[in-house]
Amino acid sequence: HLTAVSPVLLSSPVRRQAQQRCEGCHSLFGEYYCGICHLFDRDKKQYHCAECGICRIGPKEDFFHCSKCNLCLSLSLRGKHKCIENVSRQDCPICLEDIHTSRVGAHVLPCGHLLHRTCYEDMLKEGYRCPLCMHSALDMTRYWRQLDDEVAQTPMPTEYQNMMVEILCNDCNARSTVQFHLLGMKCKNCESYNTAQDGRCRLPLEEQ
């Protein structure tokens, strides 16, 4: 005969709420604790940003949340940066890793695109333009004036002295027709040398 066995009722484990200290021994689990992210860490002046949805390294009073860029930025950039909708949700165009949740700070370029601060510093060792839109990534005014002097001191060969070319400026998006020069061609609108040839070289009409 089979004997019926009563099921043994196991008591369910008590679910305890995460907290900064142990209820039993009062040991400190972390100098910083976020009750929303349940993040334990050493004190790095962290704060929780409700709009970002994560904890960030502060101090909080040094940052503000830009609702359009959807990212916490340095107070020094308030009203002084170009906003792009949800730009922080894009990956860094240099390392292709996430920017929004990265512990490495974001650097805002004049064009509004974001790079990791470390990626920005590495980029400047190789060039000066945003890898996404080719806009100058920093103020190049002093270098453009040096280039003015170099162009003036470097005459082109006779056959190129009157050669004209159409250019497109990567900084102001203006188009203009300027004299061709191997060292660079200056935008007539903003005087930047961050330009690209937008047509074939041609002689003035009176010389054709």
Image (cartoon, rainbow, N blue to C red):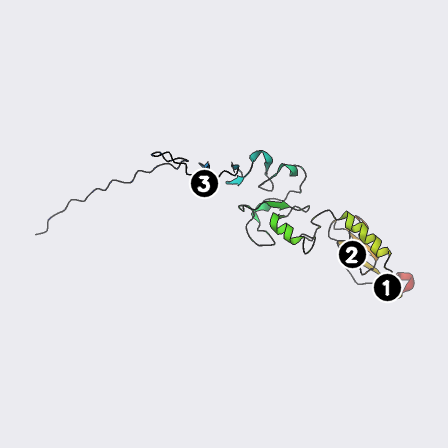
**Which is nearer the N-term, disc 1 or disc 3?**
3
- C-alpha gap between disc 1 and disc 2: 16 Å
- C-alpha gap between disc 2 and disc 3: 53 Å
Instruction: Examine the rendered structure and indicate whether residue 5 appears above or below residue 126.
Output: above
Q: Are marks 1 and 2 in contact (CB under 8 Å)?
A: no
Residue linked to disc 2: 167
**Residue nearer the viewer, 207 or 94:** 94
Determine which of the numbered discs, if any, sits on residue 204 in the image.
none
**Which is nearer the N-term, disc 2 or disc 3?**
3
Which quadrant of the structure image shows residue 202? bottom right
Amino acid type shown at disc 2: Ile
Secondary element type, mark 3: strand
Front label number (1 vs 2): 1
| Percent position of residue 149, x then y | 84, 53
**Which is nearer the N-term, disc 1 or disc 2?**
1
Secondary element type, mark 2: strand
Q: Is residue 132 in sight in this rendering?
A: no
Which quadrant of the structure image shows residue 10? top left
**Residue nearer the viewer, 131 or 27:** 27
| Percent position of residue 124, x then y | 67, 52
**Which residue appears at 78% of the width and 56% of the height?**
167
Determine which of the numbered discs, if any, sits on residue 39 in the image.
3
| Percent position of residue 196, x then y | 75, 57
Instruction: Examine the rendered structure and indicate whether residue 187 appears above or below residue 50.
Output: below
**Which residue appears at 81% of the width and 50% of the height?**
145
Q: Are marks 2 and 3 in contact (CB under 8 Å)?
A: no
Amino acid type shown at disc 1: Tyr
Amino acid type shown at disc 3: Leu
Residue linked to disc 1: 160
Horizontal placement of 79 versus 23: left or right?
right
